[in-house]
Image: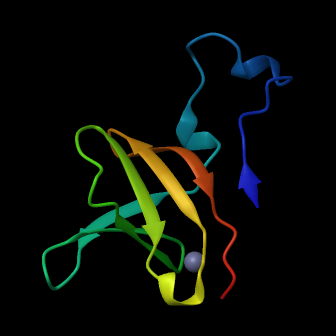
Amino acid sequence: MLVLLQEEDPQVHGHHYDLRRSYPEAFFTHTRFGNPLMLIGSYRFNKRSDSKGPYLRWVCTRKDTRCRATAHTLDNIIVMLNNTHNH
Ligand SMILES: [Zn+2]
């Protein structure tokens, strides 16, 4: 399921929109190797190595299944989420 902002929702307009209401809670931790890890429900995402700063890009850890689920976070808040997994 690709989650996008609903432009027709009157509450979306302006700067009072709370992104955390539109996306599930993300939990940030590290792997036992010290790499950043984000958990959304039971799914785990690795931070892309080319991603730095407050705006981060994450990819599903199950790259072996060619899973294309991705997430973007800004200051540890999900701002884009493709949470469609093939596993
Ligand atoms: Zn996945």
Residue ID at (32%, 38%) = 75
- Image height of 22 relative to 42, above or below: above
Ligand 1 is in which quadrant of the figure?
bottom right
Q: Quadrant of the C terminus?
A: bottom right
Q: Position of residue 28 (x, y in %)?
A: 31, 63
Residue at screen point 22% across, 80% down: 31
Q: Position of residue 49 (x, y in %)?
A: 26, 60
Q: Identify the colour scheme used.
A: rainbow
State whether residue 27 is above or below residue 21.
below
Percent coordinates x, y for residue 71 in the rendering: 51, 55
- Rendered residue at 56%/35% (across/down): 19
Does residue 21 appear anywhere in the picture?
yes
81 relative position to 28: left or right: right
- Depicted 74 relative to depicted 14: above or below: below
Residue at the top extreme of this rendering: 14
Q: Is residue 54 above or below residue 84?
A: above
Q: Is residue 87 left or right of residue 74?
A: right
* Left or right, 17 with reference to 6: left
Residue 62 is at least partly visible in this image: no
Residue 10 screen position, x and y as percent = 81, 17
Please, which residue is most extreme toward the right here?
8
In-image side of 26 versus 55 (left or right): right
Total count of labels: 0
The residue shown at (71%, 34%) is: 5
The N terminus - image quarter: bottom right
Give the quarter of the image for residue 4.
top right
